[in-house]
Image (cartoon, helix red, strand yellow):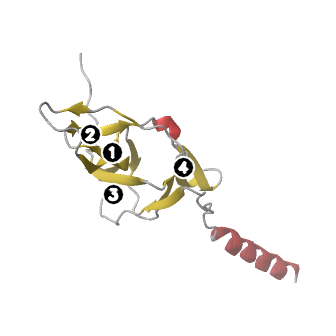
Amino acid sequence: MKSVILFFAILYSLNVYSQEKPNYPEPEKGMKRVDLKLPKIENDKEYKVEIRFGIEMDVSECSDINNFSFNRKNLEEWYGISPSRFPYYVLPKEIPVEVLTFNKPNCDETKKVKKKVLSSQNFFREYNGYYAIPFYIPEKWTVEYRLWKVNSEFKNVEK
């Protein structure tokens, strides 16, 4: 009888702990949660994901602006299940955004247009099409990504 009870106790505990789901927090006021969900593909080991952040800004029609300064150290990595499963990323609510603009000569700088500007620093992750990666970012920000195909073969560096 003890072995039957022990068997069911072990079976119950396995069932409870095997279905542990990540626990993600609710976004704070002024923040939003964006889930990066990549499609499932074959040979996902051959791909990397480049992630950048974007902001839509009012800039002069004359300005040649490509990116804004962003320090990767501002991005915090947390986990939905401690100690290191189901990562999610959090940006602070207030991040100073510095933009270096170059104006085209002989152009009217008073005319403004909306333009999406991407962060200067990016970060790469392994391709993962199995679960979404949550990002907690300021409401006016976006998460942008692109895929890179990588060669798994390493080359030897010679003198």
Q: Which residue is mark 3?
A: 44
- The correct choice, above or below, for 20 with respect to 67 in the image is below
**Three-letter residue code for mark 1:** Leu
Q: Residue at x 60, y 63 (%)?
A: 22
Q: Nearer the viewer, mark 3 or mark 1?
A: 1
- Helix or strand or loop: what does disc 2 sit on? loop
- Outermost residue on the top side: it is 159
- Compared across the picture, whether 64 is left or right of 10 comes to left
Locate residue 18, reporting x and y percent. 64, 69
Residue ID for mark 2: 66
Q: Residues within 10 Å of mark 1 (few under 14, many from 20)?
A: many
Q: Earlier in the sequence, mark 1 or mark 4?
A: 4
Mark 4 lies on residue? 90
User: Label 2, label 3: how many angstroms apart (C-alpha)?
Assistant: 30 Å
Using the numbered discs, state the Cα–Cα distance from disc 4 to disc 2 in whole angstroms: 24 Å
Disc 2 residue crowd, few under 14, some 14–19, many 20+, Cα 10 Å:
some
Amino acid type, label 4:
Val
Q: Residue at x 68, y 75 (%)?
A: 15
Q: Amino acid at mark 2?
A: Asn
Q: Residues within 10 Å of mark 4 (few under 14, many from 20)?
A: some
Cα distance between the residues tagged 1 and 2: 7 Å
| Crowding near the residue tagged with mark 3, few <14, some 14–19, many ≥20 C-alpha atoms within 10 Å | few
Q: Estimate the x, y position of residue 51 in percent, counting from the top left.
A: 37, 48
Residue bearing the label numbered 1: 118
First in sequence, mark 2 or 3: give its number: 3
The residues bearing labels 3 and 4 have C-alpha atoms spaced at a distance of 25 Å
